[in-house]
């Protein structure tokens, strides 16, 4: 089987799990940052998406750093979806780190260290370097193997050509091994890094496209390189500050990234790295790309974390902080004081607040349509209408959960399209919050540790609502 390059493999075999936000492809804005009604998986939340789009544009232009944005709204109004849309719109080169507020308390390191690592994961460094590359189409590969193993070293010749010239290179043992490993044959277009000797297969030449009748989908055809065989190319590496920290703080260097356990990193290491990156920036070797750090459930952070965030946002090397919460006026964790969204007033003052609104019936219908498409479920119009009504009465998340359950019920009766009966069946099988609360009220005396006192009817109605 043909061995593939890593970049090709990523394109071909990218399998994404169908998750809660896997249908989000971006923020759904046009070129003038006006939100479209339904686009890139986003529905409704027009003002919130427009505000997020303005911030996104400022991030891309590099005009915003050390700012913080708060996405505030009721549960199930698309706060995480907007953050995911921002991440997708930023592209691959701008770092986007995502953590939940409760994550910091489950790590084997201090809260401030965990926050520092999250901040540095969201700051990218684009390092530029020039390398000498030999790039051409393979005309012929000759490798002479000795008759007796071990008697003599392998020798070989490689003939490369571009549109203007053709050259024969003598191959050493390491290059012969690399050519064998990459399965280089005549007709391939390859690039050889002169410094490291690394061979990269760019594809097959168009002139050889008719050599074989059967071609796999992974075969990529490219033009024969023009100009000289030896070229100077500028290579750009994109890494995050956290990755540089890990490599420099561990004895195993680069391999430390794969061990998983990064542990606490000393402040001196970080200071040295910051100084070095600043030097590279002045020399024009590197540029800093401030990314986005998204903290979901920010109300779960305590007063120490909030005071750290205040300080970290004023640092010149800080990313754009996007936080989300669904709490109203609630107690700040670690204190007895109440505050809007459970965030201290001094930090709230630094935040640009974007609020999300509850979805209308029409928007719920559109979201359910998108989710049916994403989960590959055929549903009749009547069933979709009923599911929309359920979404309005209960919650959007509950209605989305019923899609897959109804598809399984339909599969069991060997049907192709989800009908009203399937929705009714799963609606009776799985309770929503309101019905579950009513059930608890009716049978609370049969549960352990139940309140034995009589419950007022008003209290019951309040809890159900």
Image (spheres, rainbow, N blue to C red):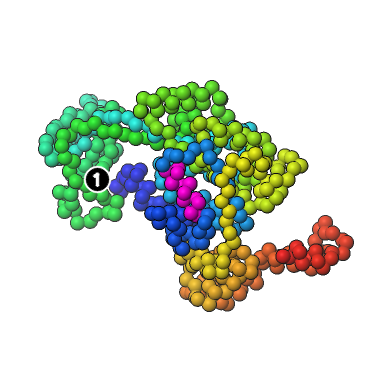
Chief SS of the magenta region: helix
Q: Looking at the image, is 148 positioned above or below residue 375? A: above
Q: Which residue is mark 1?
A: 203
**Mark 1 crowd level (few <14, some 14–19, many ≥20, 10 Å Cα):** some
**Residue at figure coordinates x 84%, y 64% from the top left:** 455
Residue 93: percent from the left, percent from the top? Answer: 40, 41
Residue 40: percent from the left, percent from the top? Answer: 44, 58
Residue 136: percent from the left, percent from the top? Answer: 19, 38
Q: Nearer the viewer, residue 457 or 404?
A: 457
Q: Looking at the image, is 420 positioned above or below residue 130? A: below
**Residue at figure coordinates x 73%, y 45% from the top left:** 338
Picture quarter with the C terminus: bottom right
Judged from this view, the residue extending furthest toward the right is: 453
Q: Looking at the image, is 84 positioned above or below residue 439? A: above
Element type at mark 1: strand
**Residue at figure coordinates x 17%, y 29% from the top left:** 170
User: What is the quadrant of residue 439 in the picture?
Assistant: bottom right
User: Does the magenta portion include 256?
Assistant: no
Kindly tell me whether residue 83 is visible in this rendering: yes
**What number of labels is visible?**
1
Left/right placement of residue 21 relative to residue 33 reads right
User: What is the quadrant of residue 117 in the picture?
Assistant: top right
**Residue at figure coordinates x 63%, y 52% from the top left:** 326
User: Does the magenta portion include 52?
Assistant: yes
Magenta span? 49-60
Residue 261: percent from the left, percent from the top? Answer: 55, 34
Q: Nearer the viewer, residue 357 or 412?
A: 357
Left/right placement of residue 406 relative to residue 26 reads right
Kindly tell me whether residue 16 is visible in this rendering: no
């Amino acid at each position: 089987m043909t061995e593939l390059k890593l970049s090709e493999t990523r394109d071909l075999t990218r399998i994404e799990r169908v998750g809660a936000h896997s249908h989000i492809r971006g923020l759904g804005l046009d070129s003038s940052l006006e939100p479209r009604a339904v686009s890139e998986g986003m529905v409704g939340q027009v003002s919130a998406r427009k505000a997020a789009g303005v911030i996104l544009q400022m991030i891309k232009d590099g005009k915003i750093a050390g700012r913080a944005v708060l996405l505030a709204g009721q549960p199930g109004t698309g706060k995480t979806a907007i953050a995911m849309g921002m991440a997708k719109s930023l592209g691959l080169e701008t770092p986007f780190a995502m953590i939940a507020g409760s994550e910091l308390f489950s790590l084997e390191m201090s809260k401030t260290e965990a926050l520092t690592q999250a901040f540095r994961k969201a700051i990218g460094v684009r390092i530029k370097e020039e390398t000498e590359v030999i790039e051409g189409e393979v005309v012929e590969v000759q490798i002479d193997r000795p008759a007796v193993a071990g008697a003599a070293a392998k020798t070989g010749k490689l003939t490369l050509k571009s549109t203007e010239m053709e050259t024969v290179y003598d191959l050493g043992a390491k290059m012969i091994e690399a050519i064998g490993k990459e399965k280089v044959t005549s007709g391939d277009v390859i690039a050889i890094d002169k410094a490291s000797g690394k061979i990269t297969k760019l594809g097959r030449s168009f002139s050889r496209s008719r050599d074989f009748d059967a071609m796999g989908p992974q075969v990529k055809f490219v033009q024969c390189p023009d100009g000289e065989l030896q070229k100077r190319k500028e290579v750009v590496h994109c890494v995050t500050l956290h990755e540089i920290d890990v490599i420099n703080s561990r004895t195993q260097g680069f391999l430390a990234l794969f061990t998983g356990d990064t542990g606490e990193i000393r402040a001196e290491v970080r200071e040295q790295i910051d100084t070095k990156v600043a030097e590279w920036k002045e020399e024009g070797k590197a540029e800093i790309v401030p990314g986005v750090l998204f903290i979901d459930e920010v109300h779960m952070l305590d007063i120490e974390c909030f005071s750290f965030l205040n300080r970290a946002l004023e640092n010149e090397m800080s990313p754009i902080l996007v936080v989300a919460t669904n709490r109203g006026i609630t107690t700040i964790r670690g204190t007895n004081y109440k505050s809007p969204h459970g965030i201290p007033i001094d930090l709230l003052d630094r935040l640009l607040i974007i609020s999300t609104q509850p979805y209308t019936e029409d928007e719920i219908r559109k979201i359910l349509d998108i989710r049916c498409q994403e989960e590959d479920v055929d549903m009749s119009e009547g069933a979709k209408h009923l599911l929309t009504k359920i979404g309005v009465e209960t919650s959007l998340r509950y209605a989305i959960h019923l899609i897959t359950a109804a598809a399984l019920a339909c599969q069991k009766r060997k049907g192709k399209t989800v009908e009203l009966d399937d929705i009714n069946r799963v609606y009776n099988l799985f309770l929503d919050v309101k019905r579950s609360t009513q059930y608890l009220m009716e049978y609370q005396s049969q549960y352990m540790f139940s309140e034995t006192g009589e419950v007022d009817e008003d209290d019951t109605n309040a809890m159900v609502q």
